[in-house]
Image: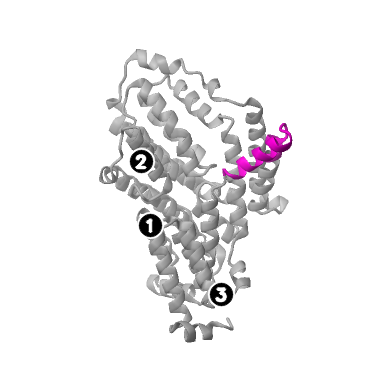
Amino acid sequence: MDNLNDVSLIWGMNPQMLAIVIMSVCYLIIFSEKINRAIIALLGAGVMIVSGILTQSTALEGIDFNTLALLTGMMIIVGIAEKSGMFQFVAVWGAKKVKASPRGLLVVLPLVTAVFSAFLDNVTTVLLIAPVTFQITRTLKINPYPYLILEIFASNIGGTATLIGDPPNILIGSSVGLSFMDFVYHLTPVVVATMIVLLILADLVWGRRLTTHDEYRAAVMEMKAADCIVDKGLLYKSLFVLACVIAAFISARQINLDNGTIALVGAAVLLLLYSWKFKGEERDAKVQEVFGLVDWTTIFFFTGLFVIVYGLEETGVLRALGSWFLELTGGSLTAMTYLVLWSSAILSSAIDNIPFVATMIPMIKSMEASVGGREVMMPVWWALSLGACFGGNGTLIGASANVVVAGMAMREGHPIKFLGFLIWSIPVMLLSVAIANIFLFLEYN
């Protein structure tokens, strides 16, 4: 960049070092959770521009608007669909299918959580499923703790299965140009195998210990799943739009549309169908209400983060890291794959996986030419996704969904302690990453 020489004169350090300092300070504050992460990301982006590392125009080049569109569109679709009560309906329906058996619920509730997490934001999923879990376990007079723990694990594992299931996948898919079906083909088998192992282990650990009286089970069986549906018309509209959006994701390459465009168009159609029956000011109020459902903190956090990472990319920091990584692994694709998988999982257990993945993406891109191109590098990309998503199960702060469930459990009088969670989370995380390692080995060796 033309103005990089001026940077060192003004700030007293070279552009690369300045970019590293800006990024490090921002990430440390973000990880400390002392200040809202969106504020820090936007301030960091501003410093990247004011310092001269980026210009306003190059900063805009660094923002991945496809990712922002995909996130915003899916938030609107899920926010409207949630109002119909369809997600609670499925949870109650599933509980009745196993005749309110505590042992059967060890399968149903995590399974429902995993499936929803593949298509919804993980936090949204647990916010929908956890209250139903409390209601059912309260009626059965059993401890909700095992179910909540499994729902945390299932949300992070299930979210790994698709492009839209977890923010790291959205980042990777948008940056690398991967389709919805690419993720389904390469990652869903790993997720299915991991869920099967998790449910078997859960049954071995808790299955026989969870018992209740027949009268309590009868009370659950009296629950009417249909009562969860509060708006049938909206249910049908939501299902129609969701089906169309997922079909468009699957055929995105054939119809030549980006995932962000598909999500925003789907959101606009569902918003139109939702607000159509209202008139005048009431209609405008409903539209404003839906836009309020968008997690703007996350949207602006991503925006600032893109600019910060682009500053590292423009100054050559990430290319230098890529070269060091190549030397460390001796240029071995196998070594790169396994190192990225395990390091991503371990680091994502302790820190937010979104900034980690955002930083790793351009670094891995910088190595592609040295190893033979994008196709050759694909095992590393899948390793990054699996490690970052599965790593969220490592600790209670490893993913936002974990923190949300812990907070809800505390309010219900069933606290999930940090150290107590580690007894279950570390083995589950290590086992899931080991399963991912086996799949990567079988597919690419």
Residue at disc 3, secondary structure: loop
Say what amino acid the circle numbered 2 marks: Ala
Choose mark 1 or mark 2, whichever is in front.
Answer: 1
Q: Residues within 10 Å of mark 2 (few under 14, many from 20)?
A: many
**Residue drawn 42% across and 40% down?**
154
Which mark is drawn over residue 34? 1
Residue at disc 1, secondary structure: loop
Q: Which residue is mark 3?
A: 54
Which mark is drawn over residue 406? 2
> Which stretch did the figure color magenta?
271-293
Question: What is the CA distance from the residue labelled 1 to the residue labelled 2?
Answer: 19 Å
**Residue drawn 55% across and 73% down?**
49
Say what amino acid the circle numbered 1 marks: Lys
In percent of width and height, residue 349 lies at 36, 53
Q: Residues within 10 Å of mark 3 (few under 14, many from 20)?
A: many
Q: Are the residues tagged 3 and 2 within 8 Å (C-beta)? A: no
Classify the position of the C terminus by image quarter: bottom left
Q: Earlier in the sequence, mark 3 or mark 1?
A: 1
In reply to whether residue 291 is colored magenta, the answer given is yes
In reply to whether residue 318 is colored magenta, the answer given is no
Compared to residue 154, the image places residue 9 above or below, namely below
Compared to residue 205, the image places residue 173 above or below, namely below
Q: Are the residues tagged 1 and 2 within 8 Å (C-beta)? A: no
